[in-house]
Amino acid sequence: MNSSERVGRIRALWRYPVKSMLGEELDAVDLSDGGVVGDRAYAVVDRETDKIASAKHPKLWPNLLACRAAFVDSTRPGDELPPVRIELADGNAVLSDAPDVDAVLSRFFGRDVELAHAAQNGYTIDQYHPDEEHYDPEGHRDEVVEARLGAAFFNERGLPSAVPEGSFFDLFPLSVLTTSRGELEPQSRFDARRFRMNVTIETPARGFVENEWLGRTLAIGDDVRLGVALPDPRA
C-alpha cells in the first residue's frame, strides 16, 4: 500500500452499548481517545464468579449474542450517557436504569447476573478454545481458558493501557473490518456479527488487506487518524 493510497470508503458505523451483545448501526458517531462514545459502556457480570459474560464462551452464554442493545437517545462527548434499551432474544426488553434490570437479565440467562457500568482495573472472562490446531499458541484445545482483559491486560505486563480505565474493551478502543474479508471465501459461513466491529470499510482490494495496514495510520475524513496495531484474531 502506498503511503497515501485510498483504500476504500465507509460502509457502516456501529456501536455496541453492552459488551458481547448486538449493537446499533449509526449514520455518524462521536470519537474520542477512548473510542466511539458509548461503545462497550456496559457489561453483564456473573455474580457467582465476578467474571464478565462473553460471547467468547458460547457454551455458557449461548443467547448473549442474540440480544441487542441501543441507547434510547443520542450521546454527546462529555455528557452523561442516556439509558440503554436491551432487547432480549425471548422478545422481552428492559432499560439499563430500570430497578429490576438485574432480575430481568438473571431470569433470561438463568444465572445470577448484574448489569455493570464500569470495569474495576480491567476484568476477567472465560474463553472457549476449540479443538483446532494452531488456534492457541499455548496449545489449549477444547477447553475454557481464563483471560484478563481491558486495562488489566496491560497493567500486568507493565505496559501503558491502550484502553481507558473502567472500560469494557478487550485490548483496543476501536476496531475496523473490510468487506474484502467477507468476500475472500464467498461460500464460507462468514458472519460479521462475531467481529462486532465499529467501522466497516468497503474496499475493492481482495484478501486480508487489513494485514498490510499494521503499524500504519488509517485516515478517515479530514480529522480522524487511527493507528493500526493488531489484526482481529476472530475469523
Image (cartoon, rainbow, N blue to C red):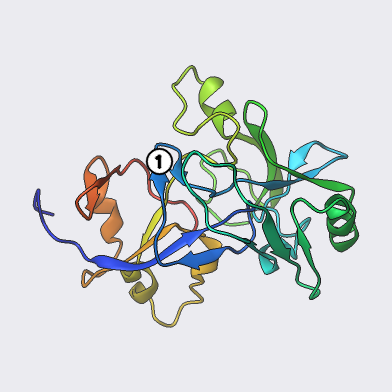
As shown in the figure, which amino acid type bears the numbered disc 1? Ser
Q: Is 47 left, or right, of 177 in this rendering?
A: right
Q: Quadrant of the N terminus?
A: bottom left
- Quarter residue 67 falls in: bottom right
Is residue 155 positioned above or below 148 on the image? above
Is residue 190 positioned above or below 144 on the image? below
Residue occupying the far bottom of the picture: 187
Going 45% across and 21% down the picture, which residue do you hit? 159
Going 79% across and 76% down the picture, which residue do you hit? 91
- Quarter residue 52 falls in: top right
Toward the viewer: 150 or 231? 150
Where is residue 59? Give x, y as percent: 76, 59
Whether residue 205 is visible: yes
Label 1: which secondary element: strand
Provide the residue designation for mark 1: 32
Where is residue 226? Give x, y as percent: 29, 44
Is residue 228 positioned above or below 163 on the image? below
Is residue 199 positioned above or below 147 on the image? below
Where is residue 171? Give x, y as percent: 49, 39
The total of numbered circles placed on residues is 1
